[in-house]
Every structure is written in C-alpha cells, then in structure tokens.
Image (spheres, grey):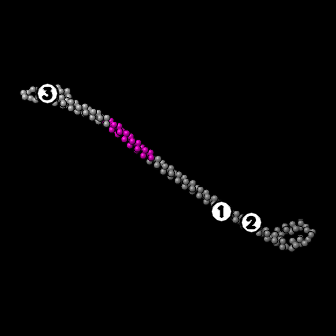
Amino acid sequence: MPLTPLDIHNKEFTRAFRGYDEDEVNEFLDQVIKDYEAVLREKKDLFEQVTALDEKLSHFNNIEETLNKSILVAQEAADDLRSNAQKEAQLIVKEAEKNANRIVNEALSKSRKVMMEMEELKKQASVYKMRFKMLIEAQMEMLQTEDWEQFAGNEDFDEEELLKEQEEQENV
C-alpha cells in the first residue's frame, strides 16, 4: 500500500545516540510531505484529465465510426442510384430503338404502299391514254368517212338515221 502524506507526517523514528538533527529531519519531512501532496494532486489531476480525454476519445471514435458507416451507406446509395440510372438509360435506349424501328417500318410500309399506288395510277393513266387515243382515232375515222361529207353537204339532215348507222358500225 502506498504512503500517504499523513503516513509520512506521523512517522516516528527511534532515537539513537548521535543520530540526525531532529529539526533538520522534520523540515526535510515537511518538504517531502508538501512535494508528495503536490505529486498526488498532480497525479489526481492527470488521472482526471486522462479520464476526460478517454471519454472524448471514445466520443470521437463513436463519431468516426458513425461517419464511416454514413459514408458507406452514402456510397452504397450512390452505387445503387448509378446502377438504377444505367438500367433506366438502357431501358430508354431500348425503347427508343423499338420506336425508331417501328417508325422506320411504318415509313417503309407507307413508301411501299405509295409506290404501289403510283404504279396503279401509272397503269390507269396508260389505259386512259390508250382509250382516249382510240376514241380520238375513232372520231378521226368518222370524220374521214363519206357519211360525214354527205351530212355536211345535205341540208336535210336526219338525226335518227345517223344514230342508226352509228349503232350498226359499233355492232360490227
């Protein structure tokens, strides 16, 4: 068990012949007691300081641990967000590609339809042209026939007779 200042103060030495000077020893002991008390106070203060610093260190270690966990959670959240954003971007790209393909296919289909309609119109125009040409040629032939000259020179023009002749020529 360590000595206390009171133990030092109460210490009694045995007396011997021709021993040390008692006053000098007492003064020295008083000085030792003062220094020892100062050392004990300092030890107590330092112990309290160490305890306070340990508590602060423990507090800061808890804060550090919490911050590290928070950083990890934030990194995981950022990674999840990045991953989700990439997935969403891929979905958007796929959807855009589908839409683009659909639009291209629709355009090609419309283009084919327009080309078929154009070919049909060309055929119809060709048929119309041929029929119109035949009609004009038939009309030219009629103008060049003698019947026309007869009607032109004959003032007694009978319309019914002309219609009958026309029907006969058409039936032939």
Kindly state the secondary structure of the residue where label 3 is placed. Answer: helix
| Residue type for callout 2 | Tyr
Numbered mark located on residue 115 in the image: 1
Q: Quadrant of residue 59?
A: top left
- Callout 2 secondary element: helix
- Asked if the residue under mark 3 is in contact with the one under mark 2, i.e. CB atoms within 8 Å, the reply is no
Q: Kindly identify which residue carries mark 2.
A: 128
User: What type is the residue that disc 3 sits on?
Assistant: Asp
Residue 64 lies in the magenta-colored region: yes
Residue density around tag 3, few if under 14, some if 14–19, many if 20 or more, within 10 Å: few
Q: Dots 2 and 1: beta carbons under 8 Å?
A: no
- Cα separation between marks 2 and 3: 152 Å
Image point 82% across, 72% down: which residue?
A: 141
* Residue sticking out furthest to the left: 17
Question: Along the line of sight, which residue is nearer the eye, 80 or 126?
Answer: 80
Name the dominant secondary structure of the magenta segment: helix
N-terminal of the pair, mark 2 or mark 1, is: 1
Question: Is residue 92 shown left or right of residue 128?
Answer: left
- Residue depicted at 13% across the width and 29% down the height: 24
Residue span colored magenta: 54-78
